[in-house]
Amino acid sequence: NAGVTQTPKFRILKIGQSMTLQCTQDMNHNYMYWYRQDPGMGLKLIYYSVGAGITDKGEVPNGYNVSRSTTEDFPLRLELAAPSQTSVYFCASRKRDNEQFFGPGTRLTVL
Amino acid sequence: QKEVEQNSGPLSVPEGAIASLNCTYSDRVSQSFFWYRQYSGKSPELIMSIYSNGDKEDGRFTAQLNKASQYVSLLIRDSQPSDSATYLCAVNDYGGSQGNLIFGKGTKLSVKP
């Protein structure tokens, strides 16, 4: 199993541009999550999904959108990128017992 | 606002010593507790989970949980330089949505050879 995979690893965006961060898991987990991690600030939940077709907002959803058309994929969309969205983004999935497993992350810079 | 508090460190210990990492949480009804290790520039890696009061041991790692005091700790015995990382404490948001996790900001551990 590859676990949780994310693409791209790095990206630089200009202010106002849009992009989609890809996340795929092959563990057949229903629950998936998107976090952002800023230096010294811990992990903040952006969006989560409890299964295909079901998504909900986390703590910091503004400026982001998600979709979940399949169990495996949970892309995160940034519309109109802003410097405040410069961060490291992690996707995670979890088993029923709350153990979450993280992908390798995407480092995004908005200039 | 539910919170998970950790001392940011850095915590510096000599090689071979015991490293003790602490975490307190505000939500009294939380049921699941986790420790993640995060090397610089890498993603968090789950190293311990604990659900019941008391100790849970896995190799050189021991997690301790005291729900009455709302306190979780991680002990690393025989610390090695390779243990140098940031350790994140996470607690499930039991009263919130679908068992989401609330993370502390992490404690940076440095093990000196």
Image (cartoon, rainbow, N blue to C red):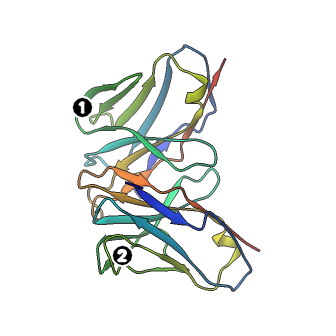
Residue appearing at x 32%, y 77% in the figure: A70
| Nearer the camera: disc 2 or disc 1 | 2
Q: Which mark is residue B97?
A: none
Q: Position of residue B109 (x, y in %)?
A: 59, 31
How many residues crowd mark 1 within 10 Å: few (<14), some (14–19), many (20+)? Answer: some
Q: Residue at x 46, y 44 (%)?
A: B45
Read off the residue under disc 1.
B53
Q: Is residue B65 left or right of residue A17?
A: left
Q: Point out the image quarter for the N terminus of chain B.
A: bottom left
What residue lies at 47% left-to-right and 61% top-to-bottom?
A5
Q: Residue B83 or A6: which is nearer the viewer?
A: A6
Q: Residue B44 or A8: which is nearer the viewer?
A: A8
| Quarter of the view holding residue B111 | top right
Report the amino acid beneath label 2. Answer: Asp
Question: Label 2 to label 1, Cα distance in Å?
Answer: 32 Å
Determine the chain carrying the residue at label 2.
A
Q: Quadrant of residue A67?
A: bottom left
Q: Residues within 10 Å of mark 2 (few under 14, many from 20)?
A: some
What residue would you read off at disc 2?
A56
Question: x%, y% of residue B37?
Answer: 50, 40
* Above or below, comparing residue B8 to residue A91 in the picture: above
Quarter the C terminus of chain B occupies: top right
Residue A42 x %, y %? 54, 52
Identify the image quadrant of residue A71.
Answer: bottom left
Identify the residue at horizontal 24%, vertical 50% (top origin): A97
Q: Label 1: chain? A: B
Label 1 is placed on what type of residue?
Asn
Percent of width and height locating residue A110: 71, 73
